[in-house]
Amino acid sequence: MCGIVGYIGNQNSQGILVEGLKKLEYRGYDSAGIAVFTKDGLQIVKALGRLANLESKLEHSPLVGSAGIGHTRWATHGKPSDANSHPHTDESHKFSVVHNGIIENYLELKEELIAEGCHFSSETDTEVISHLIAREYEGDIVKAVQKAIKFMRGAFALGVLTEYEPDKLVAVRQASPLIIGLGEGENFIGSDIPALLEYTRNVYILNDGEMAILTRDAVELMTIEGNFISREMITVDWDAVTAEKGGFEHFMLKEIHEQPKAYRDTMLGRMNPEGTKVILPELKLTNEQIKNIKNIQIVACGTAYNAGLVGRNLIESLVRIPVENDIASEYRYRSPIVTPETLVIVVSQSGETADTLAALREGHANGAHVLAITNVVGSSIAREADDVLVTLAGPEIAVASTKAYSSQIIAFALLALYMAEVRGTQSDEEVAHILAAMQSLPEQVESILEKKDAVKVYAEQIAKHDHLFFLGRGVDYAVVQEGSLKLKEISYIHSEAYAAGELKHGTLALIEEGVPVIAVATQEFVLEKTVSNIKEVKARGADVLAITHEEHVADLLKSVDQAFAIPKTLPMLTPALSVVVLQLLAYYASLALGHDVDKPRNLAKSVTVE
């Protein structure tokens, strides 16, 4: 991943490809490249870093030709480098591929191809695709692509060119977006509409399992099985800025809506085909090391710290190892007790958080094995950690983190289940049961998003207040801390999150008539106690919203003013659902107050100073 463009027509393609990639910069990337048919055949130029680096190379070595593909890469397999950048080719350099997504079985395919005599020049899963297509080619590029993808498991959007058929550009979609742009004497592909808007507003949107064959004068659509299909052309009336946001008003709302995909992508390739066991081939941590772990320290800042609170609950529940949570800026200064039998887990969306990087180095200095959970493969934290578990949330543009947080929860759940399998603390049946529940989470999030208007109504009410309190018990307490932070970050409303049982130890003094209180009450084993705490604040005049499961709404409405129902899942997984409601509350409250949702005052996306 991250951005695909393609062109076939009568103009020189280089400028069109580069301009298209510029329109996809908002998605984030670490390298870029283009492939163009020239008079000398298929030529590729790639560059690490910003698009300006690619443009500089192209100034010295321009590519002249009327068909080409381009890509901006956000590393998932292999570090950011020129070699790992797209487009990729086979050994003959006759086939070129750009790819978004993840090929789950690329390692076994790579081993098979190496055994057949193929040589690889990168660490990526994408290069496997170019070799597969070359192997299957028998004079028809469309059939070669169709044969190749039958061997592939995972999510992918592809743009494919071959020197043997320079009048064709093949595009494929399987669980990764791809748009076809329709011109006059020219046609386009793009992973997102902004890449196309300068050239056309007429598009086809491919569905999963579909492909397109583009020439200068025509576009044919078919299924990957080869059945031709018809599709109504769509005329896009968005402006460029709206297009970057996918039609949403803000990046934050777009990213909230991208969470189902982020969940799916973070789980993709990390379970066996039956979905009953966790597989983490990227980990160097051996079974023996896992069995010898005596304690775990989770170190992070801000939203990542809050994800770590959920992570502690998951690990202690499933693996039965004691876990501490540390704020990264405090970690070094409290003289933490770290031994070679300590696993230090550092969490950072950007992988560049200065305090978290310092904590990683502190862990290493004390002999600990350090595992990083991050969203950026080539980041400082990813490079320095002993192990890296990448969250495949994709780039996050809004300063307030949403999909990165929830993907971190998924990563923690996968890690906890993997360790439980190794240590034998959970049965195979229980692991399979939890994984089945995890695989239902994306659809459950989608059902919450369908009810966002109800959240908006309540958010507009709380926007009228200066103070607000969140309550929860157990893992609900962990998630309300994230809800409180999110509200403070973007609405500037003062809020605090409390363990519900702590009310009587001081917090009740702050409750007065009309104060909003949001109670997350999903943990059935403490539900009665949480209801008792809700009654305590109601008795003092609080206005209470409860977030709970549908089956408890009727009972809770006897004690609260309003209730919002979320789908039922396993207690340990509820933060992956309840947090979506809290994110929407913060978003709509900020919107009601007229604030800049995506760029709140005084805050930065990546905190690279201590």
Image (tube, grey):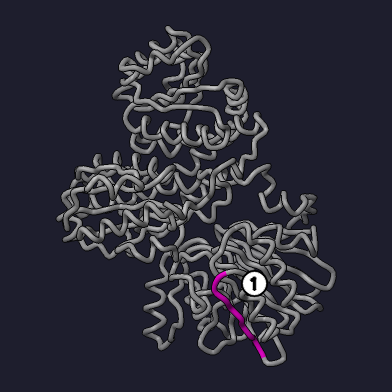
Do we see residue 549 in this rendering? no
Range of the magenta residues? 41-49
Residue found at the far bottom of this picture: 40
Residue marked by disc 1: 52
Identify the secondary structure beneath mark 1: helix
Do we see residue 33 in this rendering? yes
**Image x and y of residue 259, in percent:** 51, 46
Question: Residue, x 60% and y 76% (percent of image)?
Answer: 143
Q: Residues within 10 Å of mark 1 (few under 14, many from 20)?
A: some
301 lies above or below 381:
above
**Image x and y of residue 462, in percent:** 57, 22
**Image x and y of residue 188, in percent:** 73, 68
Question: Residue, x 51% and y 43% (percent of image)?
Answer: 402
Residue closest to the eye, 10 or 384: 384
**Image x and y of residue 376, in percent:** 46, 60
In reply to whether residue 412 is colored magenta, the answer given is no
The quadrant the N terminus occupies is: bottom right
